[in-house]
């Protein structure tokens, strides 16, 4: 076997998601030789002229890995945050104690609030890395298909795949609102930094129904975003068999449903008077 051509091919798949594949051509096989001659020098059999060069294809792989790893960090944060929020069902003391404990992590090795700031910086870096790599990959995917589909059938791609980008925008806007609401209190009517439990209850007061509606919308968007994101991350990080994809899809669905239900339970409990 003589491997003459090794490289990355990338294209936009039926979901509209940039896809990368590692290819090697065995030029010793008669069929491979003939096909290679047809394809032209330095290009795998059957491959069209690549839209971008090999180094760009390699950096596409790096970008997808950055997206997957930063996404995993963000998913980890979301689960920790959701679990922390559920303390609201234990009671005011437990919830407020948890919020204060967040500021004491790392003491006495670190001064107060340092560990929290380190986590905040890590989170911010992950968000920026995730958004920038998504934007670059999107531009590359468009360039790889300069002539857009005149008519793209609705059945193509899952609902989650088609909503990835606007879902990401909603989540981004939500995070800005949420920080102004629950962390700085800028847009919160009765904010008291020492009373996070009371802040949550008053944030979801019936007269602020539009805020609650925005939370619900953003949490649902996170659910869809996550379902597709977890699936793509598992695929990017190597699980590409048909069975592996099925397992990845199931894991993604289960994790998203748990997360959405956990987050939604808080405004739901406040609205129904279960916690007050
Ligand atoms: C109903 C759902 C949610 C509730 C009740 C909630 C509640 C809170 C509260 C009370 C804080 C302030 C914590 C503190 O300073 O002690 C907070 C902070 C925060 N939340 Fe949420 N949250 C919810 C959903 C989300 C979601 C979906 C995200 C992400 C997309 C998110 C991201 C954040 C971030 C980044 C912070 C700032 C953490 C920090 O730096 O201190 N939250 N949340």
Image (cartoon, helix red, strand yellow):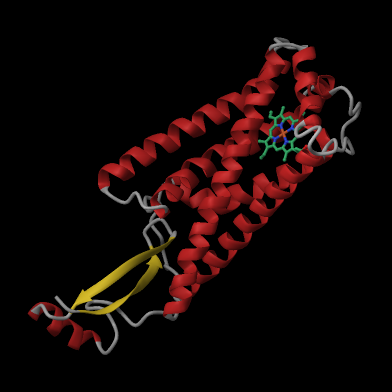
Q: Nearer the viewer, residue 116 or 230?
A: 116
Where residue 161 sits in the image (x, y, percent)? 46, 50
Above or below for 233 versus 246: below
| Residue 25 in picture, x, y percent from top left | 22, 75
- Which image quarter holds the C terminus? top right
Front in this rendered view, residue 269 or 78: 78
Q: Residue at x 23, y 84 (%)?
A: 39
Q: Nearer the viewer, residue 24 or 275?
A: 24
Q: Residue at x 85, y 38 (%)?
A: 111
Q: Is residue 3 left or right of residue 161?
A: left
Q: Is residue 256 above or below residue 119?
A: above
Name above or below for residue 255 compared with residue 159.
above
Residue that appears at 69% across and 33% down: 215
- Which residue extends farthest front? 109
Image quadrant of ligand 1 equals top right
Whole-percent x and y of residue 86?
Answer: 65, 20
- Displayed quadrant of residue 102: top right
Q: Could you tell me which quadrant the N terminus lies in?
A: bottom left
| Residue visible at 42% across and 78% down in the picture | 54
Image coords of residue 141 (percent x, y): 47, 68
Q: So how many labels did they put on this image?
A: 0
């Amino acid at each position: 076997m003589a491997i003459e051509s090794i490289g990355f091919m990338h294209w936009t798949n039926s979901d509209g998601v940039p896809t990368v594949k590692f290819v090697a051509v065995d030029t010793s096989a008669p069929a491979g030789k003939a096909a290679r001659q047809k394809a032209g020098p330095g290009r795998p059999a059957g491959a069209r002229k690549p839209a971008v060069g090999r180094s760009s294809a390699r950096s596409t792989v790096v970008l997808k890995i950055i997206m997957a790893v930063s996404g995993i960090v963000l998913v980890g944060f979301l689960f920790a945050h959701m679990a922390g929020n559920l303390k609201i069902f234990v009671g005011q003391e437990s919830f407020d104690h948890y919020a204060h404990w967040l500021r004491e992590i790392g003491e006495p090795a670190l001064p107060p609030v340092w560990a929290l700031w380190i986590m905040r910086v890590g989170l911010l870096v992950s968000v920026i890395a995730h958004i920038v790599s998504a934007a670059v990959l999107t531009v590359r995917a468009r360039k790889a298909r300069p002539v857009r589909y005149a008519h793209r059938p609705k059945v193509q791609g899952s609902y989650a795949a088609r909503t990835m980008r606007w879902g990401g925008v909603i989540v981004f806007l939500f995070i800005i609102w949420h920080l102004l609401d629950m962390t700085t209190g800028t847009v919160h009517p009765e904010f008291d930094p020492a009373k996070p439990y009371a802040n949550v209850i008053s944030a979801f007061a019936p007269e602020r129904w539009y805020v609650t509606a925005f939370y619900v919308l953003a949490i649902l968007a996170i659910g869809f975003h996550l379902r597709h994101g977890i699936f793509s991350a598992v695929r990017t990080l190597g699980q590409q068999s048909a069975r592996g994809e099925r397992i990845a899809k199931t894991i993604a669905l289960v994790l998203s449903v748990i997360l959405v239900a956990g987050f939604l339970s808080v405004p739901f409990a406040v609205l129904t008077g279960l916690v007050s």
